[in-house]
Amino acid sequence: MADNSPRKLANPLLGAHMSIAGGMDKAVQRASDVGCGCVQVFTKNNNQWKAKSIEPEVATRFRDALKQLDVRSPLSHSSYLINLASPDNALWKRSIDAMVIELLRASQLGIPYVVVHPGAYTSSTESRGLRRIIRALNEVHRQTVALDSICLLENTAGQGTCLGWQFEQLAQLLDGVKQPDRLGVCIDTCHAFAAGYPLATESDYRETTRALKRLVGISRIKAIHVNDSKRELGSRVDRHEHIGIGKIGRPAFARLMNDRRFQEIPMYLETPKEDHPKTGKPWDVVNLARLRRMIGRPIPRH
Ligand SMILES: [Zn+2]
Ligand SMILES: [Zn+2]
């Protein structure tokens, strides 16, 4: 018999990026303390190339903390120094090596995905940059066959010569690599909006998610960064804002929270770590509550 009751929406898994200061497992504790269901971390200092290798006890503590505190879908974000599009051979090779190490570390920690910004072509050109990234990813894949962790390309705001701000560019990268099944995508709402993808009204949201579906494919999206934007549509400037008080606004996030196509994809806040001025609560708590309150409710008008 057909079930005529309204289809229940599974709550999307919501979490945030957390600092690993004091130990990898501390990030999981911080996530749990503010009520995260999932967590994103850097597995090393994100502004340095070097890192000491992960001791087995560190990995065990991290895995145990996830289990004990019921924090799921751990996600790694790679170093900001990595530039797989660089025309400079030394930097390009260093970036490939660093990406391989990122995947190795993630693998040791039981983290399935590592987010990477596709890269900036700097003194080269867009098409050369894209070809460079494809070659780099093929090399990373060659060196990491034995690992369980894979890269997620994140869409960018399109600052300077950064690639991956247009969904077409992500599509080119996904189509260009030899092993596309070893590559996924992470979509950042702030970056998409800053790159010029409208989200504010219902038709904006529909248009942008349709483009995403057509060019990237929903099944390729393994993580979502939920950030509002301090800067306006198409500004190509990447400044994250708390949910609902930026230029994207509440309706878009309410639509995302109630969009069945995305409900199985873990979502992570990357909003500033500060306390709410009125309540004194950590903003992560406030943002998570805001998002959770939207689930199953009518879309607010503004
Ligand atoms: Zn992001
Ligand atoms: Zn950003």
Image (cartoon, grey):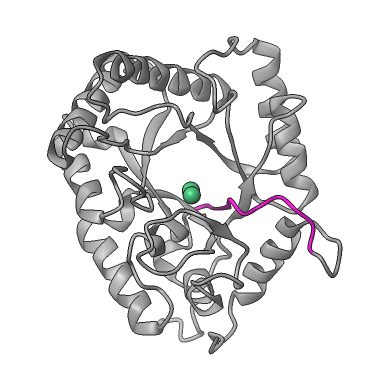
213 up-or-down from 75: above or below: below
Q: Which residues are magenta?
A: 266-276
Q: How many marks?
A: 0
Q: Residue at x 29, y 43 (%)?
A: 161
**Picture coordinates of residue 277, whole percent (x, y):** 81, 65
Q: Residue furthest front?
A: 123
At a point 48% along the width and 64% down the height, the residue shown is 231
Residue 13, given in percent of the width and then of the height, sits at 58, 56
Furthest-bottom residue in this view: 301
Residue lying at 49% horizontally and 29% vertically, measured from the top left: 79
Can you give x and y, in whole percent of width and height, for residue 164 in the image? 29, 47
Can residue 216 be seen in the rendering of this structure? no
Classify residue 287 by image quadrant.
bottom right
Quarter where residue 296 is shown: bottom right
Tell me residue 291's x, y (percent). Answer: 62, 68
Decide which of 259, 54 is in the foreground and name it.
54
Our reading of the magenta stretch's main secondary structure is loop
Relative side of 135 to 97, left or right = left
Locate residue 136 relative to residue 189 in the image: left or right.
Answer: left
Q: Quick check: 145 above or below 243?
A: above
Instruction: State the residue in front, 110 or 30.
Output: 30
Q: Which quadrant holds the N terminus? A: bottom left
Q: Is residue 134 above or below residue 97?
A: below
Foreground residue among 177 and 62: 177
Residue 211 lies in the magenta stretch: no
167 lies left or right of 155 = left
Apparent side of residue 278 relative to residue 257 in the rendered image (left or right): right
**Is 269 one of the magenta-colored residues?**
yes
Residue at 32 percent across and 38 percent down: it is 118
Indicate the quadrant containing the C terminus: top left, top right, bottom left or bottom right. Answer: bottom right
Q: Is residue 77 visible?
A: yes
